[in-house]
Amino acid sequence: MVYRLKKALYGLKQEQAETQLIVSLYIDDLLVTGGDQNILADFKAKIKDMFEMSDLGQMTYFLGMEVQLTHSGIFLGQKTFAAKILRKFFMENCKPTSTPMAVGMKPSSQGDHEQVSEPAYRSLVGCLLYLTATRPDIMFAVSLLSRFMHCCNEEHFRAVKRVLRYIKGTLSYGLQFSRSEDLKLIGYTDSDWAGLKDDMKSTSGYAFTLGSAMFCWSLKKQNVVPQSTAEAEYMVLLEQLTKPFG
């Protein structure tokens, strides 16, 4: 049985009830949370009467993400998945590096570099893209290198392996959400200038924090070529003001 949404309604007023029930569904995985244990228990009892399912208790692992609940807050990480990537590409014994990308590197599809296996490159970059769900620190490098899926060469593959070397030394990194009395929304935006040799376009980036941790981040190539560093930064700021969290 499925529900078909014929029309989305936005801007509806939220209920003012003190307790809420939040249900998140991904294929056959279901997450349920709320502020009232009785409501949670009632929901789980009713849903189990309708469908065959198992209650796994408090969430510790979901879609490759590890969840640690402590007195200080909630930690989200992907250490197990990151270690699996290293093993898959025979980099578990590599020497760690302190940064995911070399300073000043501007990868290009041009040059005399030897071509490499596209399936292997795509598989590796795809794994790293999934890892960015809890690792915004590798977002720029992975986003940049993902633009060469169709024309990958030795230079790109060395750069991707450098990201793996960085991950080797930062396996325990993730997102820590702690209780905060001040839920102040803070946003950061920045841009490089002509970071791509092929088309001289710049890359825009932003990150937002609410309270104790970052909850939203993104990187994308700008649509037009800016004439200066100031214009590139104004473009990313304008884009974020007109399309927040896009």
Image: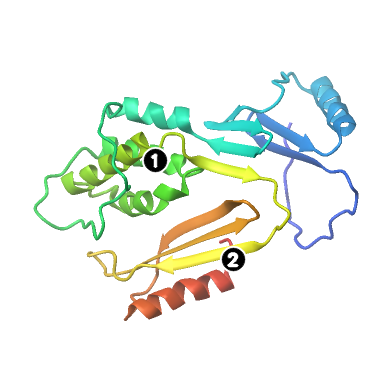
Where is residue 42? Give x, y as percent.
Answer: 88, 28
**Pointer 2 and pointer 1: residues touching (CB < 8 Å)?**
no
Q: Compared to 188, does 109 lie above or below? A: above
Q: Residue under circle 2?
A: 244
> Which of the marked residues, 2 or 1, is nearer the chain's N terminus?
1
How far is disc 2 from disc 1 in space, using C-alphas? 25 Å
Left or right: 16 as drawn, with respect to 71: right
Name the one closer to the observer, 112 or 33.
33
The image quarter containing residue 67 is top right
Does 25 sit left or right of 173 as displayed? right
Please report the residue visible at 70 percent of the width from the left and 58 percent of the height from the top: 183
Please name the residue shown 46% across and 71% down the image: 236
Q: Which amino acid does label 1 sit on?
A: Leu
In-image side of 199 versus 244 (left or right): left
Q: Which residue occupies 36% across, 48% down?
A: 142
Residue 211 screen position, x and y as percent: 65, 54
Number of marks drawn: 2
Residue occupying the point 89% across, 30% down: 38
- Bin the neighbour count of mark 2 within 10 Å (Cα to Cα): few under 14, some 14-19, many 20 and up: few
Question: Does dot 2 land on a helix, a strand or a loop?
Answer: loop
Residue picked out by circle 1 = 128
> The N terminus appears in which quarter of the rendering?
top right
The answer, for residue 126, to whether it is visible in the render is yes
Residue 63 visible from this viewpoint = no
